[in-house]
Image (spheres, rainbow, N blue to C red):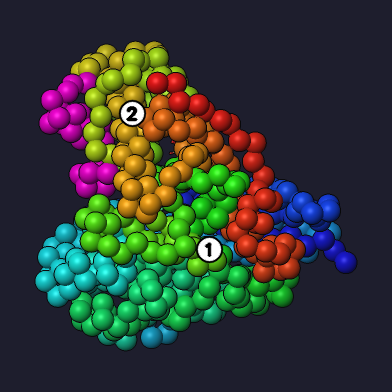
Amino acid sequence: ASPSVMIAVDIGASSGRVIIGRLPAASGQAPGTLEMEVVHRFPNGVTEIDGSLHWDAEAIYAQVKSGLEAAAAVVRQSGERVVSIGIDTWAVDYGLLDAEGQLIAPPHAYRDARTDAVIPTVHGALSPERLYAIGGLQFLPFNTVYQLAAEEDLAGKRALMIPDLLAYWLTGAERTEETNASTTALFDAREVAWSDVVFDAIGAPQLFADLIAPGETYGALRPEVAAETGLDPAVTVVAVGSHDTASAVAAVPAGDAEFAYVSSGTWSLVGLELDEPVLTEASRAANFTNERGVDGTIRYLQNVGGLWLLQECTRTWAEEGRGRELADLLGAAAALPAGGPVVDANASGFIAPNDMPQRLRAAVEAGGGELPAAPAELGSGVDADQAATVRCIVDSLAAGYAASLAQASELAGKHPEVIHIVGGGSQNTLLCQLTADATGLPVVAGPVEATAQGNLLVQARAAGLIKGGLNRLRAAIAVDPVRYEPQR
Ligand code: ADP
Ligand code: LRH
């Protein structure tokens, strides 16, 4: 029989990739190690339409199909067989469908400010305490509940979360994957079901599709999609941890040690893996979330700003004609002494795009610090203000990670011995070292593509290529971890 492979479609806020995963047979007790071949990468980002922020879902879908076409070409050459496709993206956002199942408009992006006006109304109908007791989510102004409350008219419409929308376009099946549903604040964390109480409170119909758990199947490809991509029409789309952070946490290469994790990309998701949600008032006051993970685990975590701050600074500097390589910026930041200014990386003032260097400078000054003035003349190397700004971002993230982890440990009564940093940010050696220094714990960095690995391993299990729980999946993760010991 032809060897079986899986395809991961993993789309973050800053980029997407389509990856073929192969899981060689186990030798003895040890499972084989996952092998990955990236067949397609593409940039992602929000688009401004008439003053509001959106995702160009159709363009993303076209990129997904290009990636599938590239994967089909690879397996045609190799004689392998694609068993399934798994899709993960960022959470909280959704597309609205009309009665014919057509996407009504490009989905709003969570960085759009339109929820500000409705948050007090939602909290008037259902207090933050009640919302937390049901959904267990940290307050973020873009939680789906607020976005839905800001919609004009929902009568007769249906909604699909972004990965589910892509799965719908590929298969025709309308479902809502559980880990992503758990980020909506419309979901009952204990019942693992949509919460009528919350839908009623915002006066919205329950317009999401039925739940599907990681490992279950949406369905086979639509014949048109098979024809367009060159994939076999028998290929199925399998639900994975479709919330990217759920897939990332599933691929934290944890051994037996008690661990904490940071999934570090556009956002930093900082926390612990638990068996049960923590829905106490203290947990709500500290703004910790209880999102669902693969196999019913709880991702007890907090959003701590993220490399978004750096992405936006580099974008602005490039627009100003002083674009610099990331490696040069980080090198210059690493050469600066410790003890510089820090800001609250998760402040709501950093959510929107544009002018990030200015907003950071203002936040530093509001805290009594200062950053070097932006030079009027362009330097050939990294400018002093750029180095100091990047250092401030990395110091602020490391400080935020340390504060969050200390609080998570206290609230959940767990004491991690090691911190795993996964995702694109795990390549940021300065961030990894400063996190070790700020927490006093060793940091193990990698894998960079944890999310895709978590996606692929859940599919491999659904295909019967690997058996067992998360420990078993984690033993198959491909990683060459880099370890950082605290130095201060
Ligand atoms: P997302 O899934 O949110 O789009 P990723 O996990 O792909 O994000 O991480 C993207 C981030 O990783 C970038 O913003 C950048 O800061 C960081 N990154 C990527 N490559 C490198 C590198 N070579 N060195 C340091 N940081 C890197
Ligand atoms: C990370 C992420 C995070 C959410 C945010 C919207 O990509 O999914 O877990 O809070 O995007």
How crowded pointer 1 is (Cα within 10 Å; few <14, some 14-19, many 20+) is rated as: many
Q: Look at the picture and state if 180 lies above or below 199.
A: above
Q: Which mark is residue 395?
A: 2
Quadrant where the image shows the N terminus:
bottom right
How crowded pointer 2 is (Cα within 10 Å; few <14, some 14-19, many 20+) is rated as: many
Residue at point 18%, 21% (across, down): 370
User: Which of 281 and 163 lies nearest the eye of the viewer?
Assistant: 281
User: Which of 285 and 430 lies nearest the eye of the viewer?
Assistant: 285
Q: Position of residue 10 (x, y in %)?
A: 54, 55
Q: Which mark is residue 53?
A: none
Q: Look at the picture and state if 186 lies above or below 40.
A: below
Magenta region, residue range: 346-371
Residue at point 56%, 39% (across, down): 446
Q: Position of residue 319 (x, y in %)?
A: 32, 32
Q: Position of residue 213 (x, y in %)?
A: 53, 73
Q: Which residue carries the number 1 mark? A: 294
Q: Secondary structure at mark 1?
A: helix
**Is residue 360 on the magenta stretch?**
yes
**Is residue 97 on the magenta stretch?**
no
Can residue 440 be seen by looking at this rendering? yes
For marks 1 and 2 on the same chain, the one whose residue lies earlier in the sequence: 1
